[in-house]
Image (cartoon, rainbow, N blue to C red):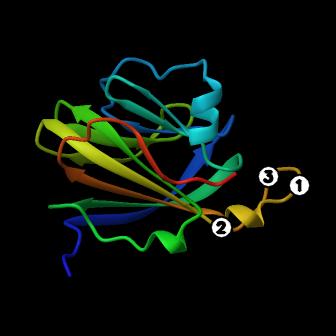
Amino acid sequence: MDLPRFRCQLRVTSEYRRFQVGDPEAPDAPEEWTEQEVADRVSLSAGCIVVSPARDGTIPVEVSFWSEEPPVMFNHWQHALEVPLATNGRIAIQDWDGQEEATLAVDPGDYTVRLLFGGLGTISEDGFTGQDFYRIQIWKAPCARLRVLRRWP
């Protein structure tokens, strides 16, 4: 089994149920969301992916960078997507306010970003506590469009 070239554990601050993955030089993230984007839990713009976790607050996020598409057992995750990302050579994981939590130096080009959501059934009724967790897998390969691989209702 292939191992990631890079892996880190982060504590990302989500406000308005949002944090970002993308080129830090990309234009600002979209503010308005369609009903489909809300259901998909992601909004895309040039060089920027806005992820919508299940709650606000500080959430655990694991980021890994791979040489090729990594294996995944989808039955361990409640929501899963793959999305395209083009970058000029950097990929940042940013809190909702743009604070960079981690930045990867990468070759410029097209990447696939797999977003995996787990523990969604543990979120409290007020939406502020839970045992939810998120994994971001990134590899260099074009991704034609957003693909929802598994959907949480």
Q: Secondary structure at mark 3?
A: loop
**Is 118 on the left-hand or right-hand side of 139?**
right
Camera-side residue of 93 and 117:
117
Residue 153 at x, y percent in the picture: 70, 51
**What percent of the width, then of the height, locates residue 7?**
31, 66
Relative to 6, residue 82 above or below: above
Q: Position of residue 14 (x, y in %)?
A: 62, 43
- Residue at image position (30%, 24%) is 25
Residue drawn at 24 percent across, 32 percent down = 86
Q: Residue at 14%, 36% (x, y): give it.
A: 109
Judging by the rendered image, the residue that carries numbered circle 3 is 128
Residue linked to disc 2? 119
Viewer-nearest of discs 3 and 2: 2
- Going from N to C along the chain, the mark reached first, 3 or 2, is 2
Residue that sits furthest to the right in the current view: 125
Q: Foreground mark, 1 or 3?
A: 1
Question: Whole-Å distance between the Cαs marked 3 and 2?
Answer: 14 Å
Classed neighbour count for the residue bearing mark 1: other residues with Cα under 10 Å, few (<14), some (14–19), many (≥20): few
Type of amino acid at the residue the image marks with label 2: Gly
* Amino acid identity at mark 3: Phe
| Residue, far left | 107
The first of marks 1 and 2 along the sequence is: 2
- Residue at image mark 1: 125
Q: Tell me the SS state at disc 1.
A: loop
Tell me the CA gap for discs 1 and 3.
8 Å
